[in-house]
């Protein structure tokens, strides 16, 4: 939505100003209008060519004082940058607008208002699209906590619907994939754990998604199941499709993080410091799951859906997963991992599940 006087100013056609060293951005932040000042080096200032660049710069510097969504280490904010002139007429600056000399003058004068509001402060009908939102976090360690993350996804889905939640979570994925290789591969404790270990904990936590969603709903115990969902945007409890979304989002992010950022030597060290049989158990469970004790193939727990466990294992092997963790013998019958994958597929050849295509690719990959 545009402000009443929101028109492109003629000065926006002028070329971007080249600021000097020590440039200062002064904005009024939040609804209370408290002043916020950001000091820039010449190199930082020269990178600001558009309003989008300006917003990103401000976001990096002012996110922490603006708080977070209660109960989580992160939040999603709607950002607007508005100029108010002497007559109190307002004009919103849009992402594609260039930063010109007049914009720098407004910054120096402190006549720009930087509006940040948590998405949960808006009614569902007023929620902005993902393009206008910014994801921020305070603690990288908690950013991959299954309880916090699944609980937050549940709250977003309840407030704005699953489609909107999925849109917002692209920001979470971008935040993690934008981490540097040093951040991804940094050793966090004496056991040699890195961010990758937290990713595995997150994926294992998917097995408890339903329980974590119930824990995030303060009215869970008082609902008249399955009829009382009027306070949900989609008028229903997040069903199996929501868990599908969690599997795709968390597993796909982990796979891309491994492919793009994981250092092969660090991957070797991570898994060599773990008990080999435990590693086999973890990776195998993500691929095939663990039987619930009945004869139904689909009745398993712990497996990543859509064959994502197989894709993850292939990515890990390519990035240095020690051979002893996947090429040796495993299980009570001392079989190879390849045999464990092939056996259930061969048992019912005419009744393959959608994820079996990925497992078949993994079979070929392991054999080669």
Image (cartoon, grey):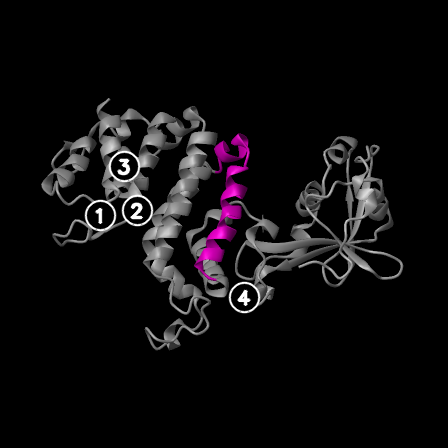
Q: Quarter of the image holding residue 268?
A: top left
Residue 95 place in picture, x, y as percent: 68, 46
Q: Is residue 182 magenta?
A: yes
Residue plotted at (85% across, 62% down):
88
Q: Earlier in the sequence, mark 1 or mark 3?
A: 1
> Which SS class for mark 2?
helix
Distance between mark 1 and mark 2 Cα atoms: 13 Å
Q: Earlier in the sequence, mark 1 or mark 2?
A: 1
Q: Closer to the camera: disc 1 or disc 2? A: 2
Q: Quarter of the image holding residue 272?
A: top left
> Which SS class for mark 3?
helix
Q: Which residue bears the numbered disc 2?
A: 305
Please rate how many residues cluster around mark 3, counting C-alpha atoms within 10 Å: few if below 14, some from 14 to 19, many from 20. Answer: some
Residue 130 place in picture, x, y as percent: 55, 52
Tell me the number on the disc at residue 2: none
Q: Closer to the camera: disc 4 or disc 1? A: 4
Q: Closer to the camera: disc 1 or disc 3? A: 3
Q: Earlier in the sequence, mark 3 or mark 2?
A: 2
Q: From where the camera sits, is residue 191 visible? A: no
Distance between mark 4 and mark 3 Cα atoms: 38 Å
Q: Which residue bears the numbered disc 4?
A: 124
Q: Would you say the residues marked 4 and 3 are in contact, meaning their CB atoms lie under 8 Å apart? A: no
Please rate how many residues cluster around mark 1, counting C-alpha atoms within 10 Å: few if below 14, some from 14 to 19, many from 20. Answer: some
Residue range of the region highlighted in magenta in the rendering: 161-188
Q: Is residue 151 magenta?
A: no
Distance between mark 2 and mark 4 Cα atoms: 30 Å
Q: Which residue bears the numbered disc 1?
A: 290
Distance between mark 3 and mark 2 Cα atoms: 10 Å
Specify the farthest residue to the right.
86
Q: Which residue bears the numbered disc 3?
A: 358
């Amino acid at each position: 939505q545009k402000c009443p006087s929101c028109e492109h100013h003629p000065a926006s056609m002028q070329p971007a100003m080249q600021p000097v060293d020590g440039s200062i951005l002064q904005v009024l932040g939040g609804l209370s209008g408290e002043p916020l000042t950001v000091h820039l080096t010449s190199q930082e200032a020269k990178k600001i060519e558009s309003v989008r660049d300006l917003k990103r710069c401000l976001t990096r510097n002012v996110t922490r004082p603006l708080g977070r969504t209660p109960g989580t280490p992160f939040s999603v904010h709607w950002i607007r940058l508005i100029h108010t002139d002497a007559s109190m007429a307002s004009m919103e600056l849009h992402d594609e607008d260039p930063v010109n000399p007049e914009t720098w003058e407004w910054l120096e004068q402190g006549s720009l208002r930087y509006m940040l509001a948590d998405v949960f402060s808006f009614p569902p009908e007023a929620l902005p699209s993902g393009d206008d939102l910014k994801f921020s976090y305070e603690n990288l360690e908690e950013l991959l906590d299954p309880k916090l993350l699944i609980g937050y996804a549940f709250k977003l889905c309840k407030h704005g619907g699953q489609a909107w939640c999925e849109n917002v979570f692209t920001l979470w994925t971008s935040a993690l994939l934008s981490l540097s290789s040093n951040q991804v591969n940094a050793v966090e404790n004496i056991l040699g754990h890195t961010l990758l270990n937290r990713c595995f904990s997150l994926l294992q936590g998917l097995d408890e998604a339903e329980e974590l969603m119930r824990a995030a709903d303060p009215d869970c115990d008082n609902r008249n199941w399955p009829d009382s969902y009027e306070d949900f945007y989609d008028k229903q409890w997040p069903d199996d499709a929501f868990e599908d979304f969690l599997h795709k989002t968390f597993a796909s992010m982990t796979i891309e993080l491994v492919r793009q950022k994981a250092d092969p030597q660090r991957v070797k060290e991570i898994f060599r410091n773990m008990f080999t049989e435990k590693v086999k158990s973890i990776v195998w469970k993500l691929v095939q799951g663990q039987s619930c004790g009945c004869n139904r193939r689909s009745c398993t727990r712990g497996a990543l859906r859509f064959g994502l466990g197989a894709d993850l294992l292939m990515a890990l092997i390519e990035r240095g997963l020690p051979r002893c963790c996947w090429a040796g013998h495993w299980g009570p019958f001392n079989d190879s991992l390849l045999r464990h994958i092939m056996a259930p597929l061969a048992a019912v050849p005419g009744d393959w599940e959608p994820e079996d295509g990925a497992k078949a690719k993994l079979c070929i990959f392991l054999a080669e």
